[in-house]
Image (spheres, rainbow, N blue to C red):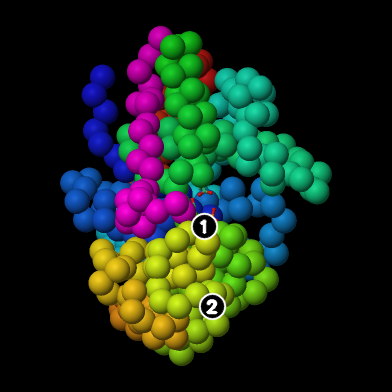
């Protein structure tokens, strides 16, 4: 059977995204949306978020801020943007898939091992990737744009889909294809696949770093961007060169510009001092993020509109989800 193309991705409700999230994931969705003939589906995965401890108020707040940010970044309001937990079929299909997934398949995944360190590894965390498979299969999605860190989860989803289809001798689910988001900085054949922390360029730029100066947020004001870039860790070598091993800080700043546009480091930057170079990086970022920040600020007063977009997304998601779950129930002998 030929399944229609359907692009789907998911993102955790972590509030306002940083530059790494944007270049590593969100921008790719915006580009795909613009060249896709069908609506793309973006799920804000609040059920995945509760696999680690969450403050209830913050979870609520961060979910809305993520929706606001996705719209500010260019996800159009007529696509299917919704909160995972509002569609109970995600949990229902996940349960069915739990019953089809050997424990060994999930036991060996890295993320579970890393995240459960120091926590009482509970079943939610162990089951995280099966819920992710349910997110994808529920919509019979065919293309899944994700970061390369999701490769194991994508392989598991493929295994679950294939084993379901073959066990029931059915073509219930298409085998989804991961589109690994090669952001432009990766295409530029850099050593780093990630944007790194501005304060410690050997670590990835991350929401959980206690130092807020280590990351640029997509809604940072001009003065914040300038301050953070000025304070970014570099080195005392003269001139600007791309050398991720020996000059990780400078190379990370080059990667930031490379994420925005093609650069020829030699002709454009080699002669600049560190300070001049940082001013250039800040200027380019301010210009690039300006329209995103402006939209973000406008949406700040539009909480009703954001709710409407989510409610409409939920309605469309529900139709697809109900239909798939009905098919699955019929297939396995449930009412
Ligand atoms: P997270 O909330 O950290 O799981 O990030 C969500 C997605 O954003 C990941 O799947 C990655 O694709 C992307 N991402 C996160 N941090 C970075 C980073 N420092 N550089 C590039 N991409 C990132
Ligand atoms: N695990 C993904 C991440 O951390 C988020 C996610 C949940 C997802 N469900 C998904 C991504 C379905 C793609 C498709 O980034």
* Residue 101, percent from left and from top: 59, 22
Residue 173 within the segment the image draws in magenta: yes
Instruction: Report crowding for label 2: few under 14, some 14 to 19, many 20 or more residues within 10 A (C-alpha).
Output: few
Give the position of the N terminus as an image quadrant.
Answer: top left
Name the side, left or right, on which 171 lies relative to 129: left
* Span of residues in magenta: 169-192
* Residue 140, percent from left and from top: 36, 33
Give the residue at mark 2. 236
Instruction: Report crowding for label 1: few under 14, some 14 to 19, many 20 or more residues within 10 A (C-alpha).
Output: few
Q: Is residue 166 above or below residue 287?
A: above
> Which residue shows up at 48% across the image and 37% down it?
151
Q: Is residue 20 above or below residue 92?
A: below
Contact between labelled residues 2 and 1, with CB atoms less than 8 Å apart: no
How far separated are the C-alphas under marks 1 and 2? Answer: 15 Å
From this viewpoint, is residue 107 visible? Answer: yes
From this viewpoint, is residue 21 visible? Answer: no
Give the residue at mark 1. 245
> Which residue shows up at 38% across the image and 43% down it?
180
Q: Earlier in the sequence, mark 1 or mark 2?
A: 2
Name the side, left or right, on which 263 lies relative to 205: left
* Residue 208, percent from left and from top: 64, 64
């Amino acid at each position: 059977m030929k399944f229609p193309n359907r692009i789907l991705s998911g993102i955790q409700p972590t509030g306002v995204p940083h530059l790494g999230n944007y270049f590593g994931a969100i921008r790719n969705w915006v580009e795909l949306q613009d060249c896709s003939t069908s609506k793309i589906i973006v799920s804000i995965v609040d059920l995945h978020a509760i696999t680690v401890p969450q403050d209830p108020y913050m979870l609520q707040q961060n979910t809305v801020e993520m929706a606001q940010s996705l719209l500010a970044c260019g996800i159009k309001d007529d696509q299917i943007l919704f909160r995972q937990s509002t569609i109970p079929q995600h949990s229902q299909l996940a349960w069915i898939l739990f019953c089809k997934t050997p424990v060994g398949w999930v036991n060996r995944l890295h993320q579970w091992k890393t995240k459960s360190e120091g926590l009482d590894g509970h079943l939610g965390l162990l089951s995280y990737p099966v819920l992710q498979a349910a997110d994808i299969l529920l919509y019979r999605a065919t293309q899944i744009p994700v970061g390369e860190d999701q490769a194991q989860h994508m392989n598991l989803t493929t295994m679950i889909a294939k084993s379901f289809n073959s066990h029931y001798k059915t073509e219930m689910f298409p085998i989804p294809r991961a589109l690994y988001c090669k952001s432009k900085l990766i295409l530029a054949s850099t050593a780093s696949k990630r944007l790194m922390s501005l304060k410690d360029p050997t670590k990835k730029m991350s929401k959980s770093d206690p130092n807020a100066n280590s990351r640029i947020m997509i809604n940072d004001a001009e003065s914040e961007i300038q301050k953070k870039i000025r304070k970014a860790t570099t080195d005392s070598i003269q001139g600007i060169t791309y050398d991720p091993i020996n000059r990780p800080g400078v190379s990370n700043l080059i990667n930031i510009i490379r994420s925005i546009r093609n650069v020829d480091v030699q002709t454009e930057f080699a002669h600049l001092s560190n300070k001049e170079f940082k001013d250039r990086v800040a200027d380019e970022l301010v210009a690039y993020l300006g329209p995103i920040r402006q939209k973000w600020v406008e949406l700040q007063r539009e909480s009703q509109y954001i709710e409407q977009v989510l409610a409409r997304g939920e309605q469309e998601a529900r139709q697809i989800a109900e239909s798939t779950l009905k098919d699955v129930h019929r297939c396995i002998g449930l009412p």
